[in-house]
Amino acid sequence: MQYIKQIDILRKQIKEYKKQGKIIGLVPTMGALHEGHASLFDAARKECDIVVASVFVNPIQFGPNEDFDKYPRPIEDDKKVAETHGVDILFNPEVEEIIGDNLLAFVDINKLSDNLCGAKRPGHFRGVCTIVSKLFNIVTPDKGFFGKKDIQQLMIIKKFVADLNFDIEIIGCPIIRESDGLAKSSRNKYLSDSERQDAAVINIALKHTVEMYNKGEKNAAKLTDAFLSTMFNIASAKIDYVHIVDENMQNVQTATDGNILAAAVYIGNTRLIDNHILGEQICW
Ligand code: PAF
């Protein structure tokens, strides 16, 4: 595996691979790699000749009071995970290399970023869209791989790629869960033992709500109330949001297959997100 920190070196290498007709896959990450990321590397490995993974904790997608400074950066561990899962190039630029000190151009998206995490984290998706566009322009991949845990991010990336004519296929990969159902996340590392136990209830609440939907309840307010009442007894939990949304991330009143039940919950100070696409099999 090549470990590259500079854009020009990466570009030279990519041009070489393109001359050879190789299909390039990109898995953008912020590091602190876990089995969720590993599953993206595996998917990219299956579909592409060359797998590029980026590890970059992107300052412009964090709000002023968020966890940018404390976000874990275990780069030596990350190198091992990436190498074990067949990554060919690990791109790990410094902030100055990617952002510089005078970034004035941004990529933003309307409507899809108004609700859910976009409403709770102003500017977050502008930061995500900008950095992902930069990575797309640097790596020029044929395919980009993103996890469905960040479902709003995935839908936004698909939409800006279509709207701005990036010639890249975006592939959404399944949520990977712990044995008790908690969605794998780099932020799970912040949880104390008791918070870790409480966090498992997010998935129980999600599952309970999906089961109600599967049994015939289609009223979105009743479904989200069911989620809230399951979480109610968890003292460390504070609901940031729970909504059922359509593909444009707009709340629906009547739920149908393909809509997304999406939640963000603080467990202590740690904000966790999870979701389920209604009509898809419960796989946990
Ligand atoms: O999902 C993430 O880890 C980040 O939002 C991403 C896509 C790497 C952009 O910084």
Image (tube, grey):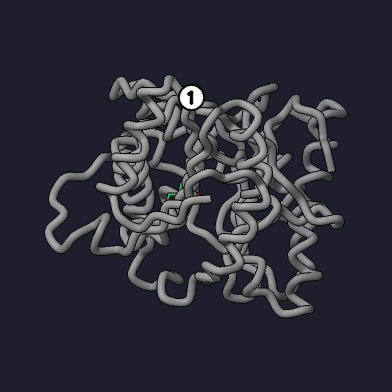
Residue at position x 37%, y 47% from top?
Answer: 128
For residue 15, what is the image quadrant? top left
88 over 203 or under it: above or below: above
Report x, y in % for residue 262.
62, 43
Depth check: give the residue in front, 274 or 58.
58
Q: Secondary structure at mark 1?
A: loop
Q: Residue at x 56, y 28 (%)?
A: 48
Looking at the rendered structure, the number of numbered marks drawn on it comes to 1
Give the labeled residue for mark 1: 23
Q: Is mark 1 within 8 Å of ligand 1?
A: no
Identify which amino acid the numbered label 1 is placed on.
Answer: Ile
Q: Is residue 25 left or right of residue 213?
A: left
Dot 1: within a 10 Å radius of its alpha carbon, few (fewer than 14), some, or many (20 or more) residues?
Answer: some
147, 282: nearer the viewer: 147
Whether residue 185 sits left or right of residue 233 in the image: it is: left
Q: Position of residue 92 (x, y in %)?
A: 41, 58
Q: Position of residue 1 (x, y in %)?
A: 53, 50
Looking at the rendering, which quadrant does residue 41 occupy? top right
Front residue (pair 272, 58): 58
Residue at 24% x, 63% y is: 96
Question: Is 236 located above or below residue 115 in the figure?
Answer: below
Q: Position of residue 164 (x, y in %)?
A: 28, 24
Which quadrant of the figure contains the C terminus? top right
